[in-house]
Image (spheres, grey):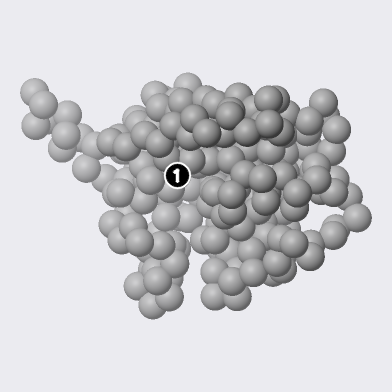
Amino acid sequence: MADVMTASLATPRARLDAGLAALGLDPSQDQRGKLIKFIDLLARWNRAYNLTAVREPLAMVSRHLLDSLAVSPYLLGSLILDLGTGAGLPGLPLAILQPESRFVLLDSNGKKIRFVRQATMDLGLANVEVIQARMESYRPGEKFATIITRAVADQETLRRVVKPLLASPGRLLLMKGRRPDEALATPTANNAVIHRLEVPFLDAERHLIEIRQD
């Protein structure tokens, strides 16, 4: 029986569908198709441009798609900044899941930004804006309800960088691996909450630091 269940999850689409169900998410068939197309694009570009250390599309489903989508319940508002998006993570999967929200994906790496721009066009994501800039110098003239990042800098540096960018109320979301207990020990982090994320098919710890600005 275990072998049958394993075999039934041996394709990216089957694993994605099972993972979405485990997360309590039910996107449309069109959205599911776009999520798989994103993985196909990433795998193809990755062979030439080394965008991510994860090589296999099946592993990308859990480590990139489901890992990104697990944070969706914590997004606040309809204007979201993915700071240091890299290969479009978590911004592109979240933008596919939430077409009514507007996502700005920012990174200073030209190679990765070229991929993100192409993927945005190929996926037909009208709710995504892609920006190449350093986060320290980015001044868009508007503030974001949610700023999310995959730990591109230490927490205190990030708090200084995002201060002029984060709305009030607003949320700074830091995606981490192992539980970062030190986040609650710093004097300026007394409004931080750590959430343990259960990512389907991922045998590794995932946590989210939610820093609230109210």
Image quadrant holding the C terminus, namely top right
Q: Residue at x 43, y 75 (%)?
A: 49
In the figure, is residue 162 to the left or right of 42?
A: right
How many numbered marks appear?
A: 1
Residue matched to label 1: 65
Nearer to the camera, 205 or 66? 205
Is residue 156 among what the camera can see? yes
Seen in the picture, residue 181 relative to 138 is either above or below; the reply is above
In the image, is 122 to the left or to the right of 44?
right
Structural crowding at the residue carrying mark 1, measured as other residues with C-alpha within 10 Å and reported as few (<14), some (14–19) or many (≥20):
many
In the rendered image, which quarter contains the N terminus? top left
- Residue 180 x/y as whole percent: 48, 34
Q: Tell me the quarter of the picture where residue 71 sits.
A: top right
Residue plotted at (31% across, 61% down): 55
In the displayed structure, does residue 3 sit left or right of residue 152? left
**Of residues 213 and 99, which is closer to you in this image?**
213
Q: Nearer the viewer, residue 209 or 133?
A: 209
Q: Return the x and y of residue 129 as percentages of the image width and height.
A: 73, 58
User: Does dot 1 land on a helix, a strand or a loop?
Assistant: helix
User: Measuring 63% from the left and 33% from the top, which residue is drawn there?
Assistant: 186
Residue located 24% across and 37% down the image: 9
Task: Say what amino acid the circle numbered 1 marks.
Answer: Leu
Q: Above or below — where is 99 with respect to 1?
A: below
Q: Is residue 102 visible?
A: no
- Provide residue 30's location: percent of width, then percent of height: 53, 43
Asked if residue 191 is positioned above or below residue 127 in the image, the reply reads above
Hey, which quadrant is residue 177 in on the image? top left
Q: Quadrant of residue 206?
A: top left
Q: Residue reaching furthest right?
A: 141
